[in-house]
Image: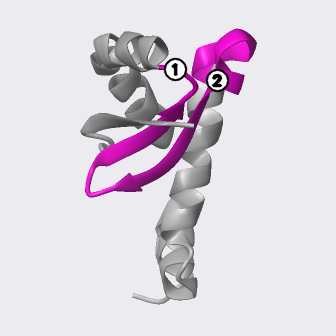
Amino acid sequence: MTREDKAPDRVGDILDPALRGLGVRGQVRDEQLRVLLSDMLGPALSPMCRAIRLERGALLIATSNSALAHQLQLDSPRLISALNQGLNAQAVRRLRFTAM
């Protein structure tokens, strides 16, 4: 089968290996998560929270206070589902919190 006979590749099928080859795939995913979390929380809460990094399925989120971290932990099933939907992948399995 020649290249012309093959169905077109999805952009993600091409982009993901390229980002991995450049060594920036994790950084790009972390930035996607920052944007998604900020959009989900809205303008009132997003200045008080920041997605730091995704490590082995755990998204580390910095919050300005423990009450906010507690509320986000209570909402974690909904947040995890929405973040994974935004990434189009099951990358986030749990949330962890730290102080800003």
Secondary structure under the numbered disc 1 in the rendered image: loop
Establish if 94 lies above or below 39. Answer: below
Q: Residues within 10 Å of mark 2 (few under 14, many from 20)?
A: some
- To which quarter of the image does residue 41 belong? top right
> For the residue marked with disc 1, what is the amino acid?
Asn
Name the image quarter holding the N terminus: bottom left
* Label 2 element class: helix
Colour scheme employed for the rendering of this structure: one colour
Residue 88 horizontal/vertical position (percent) = 43, 41
Q: Which residue is mark 2?
A: 48
The single residue placed furthest to the right in the displayed view is: 43
Residue 32 appears left or right of 53:
right
Quadrant for residue 96, please give it: top left
Q: Nearest the camera: 50 or 17? A: 50
Q: In this figure, which residue is indicated by the disc labeled 1? A: 65
**Which quarter of the figure is the C terminus placed in?**
top right
Residue 39 in view of the camera: yes
Real-space CA distance between mark 1 and mark 2, rounded to the nearest whole angstrom? 8 Å
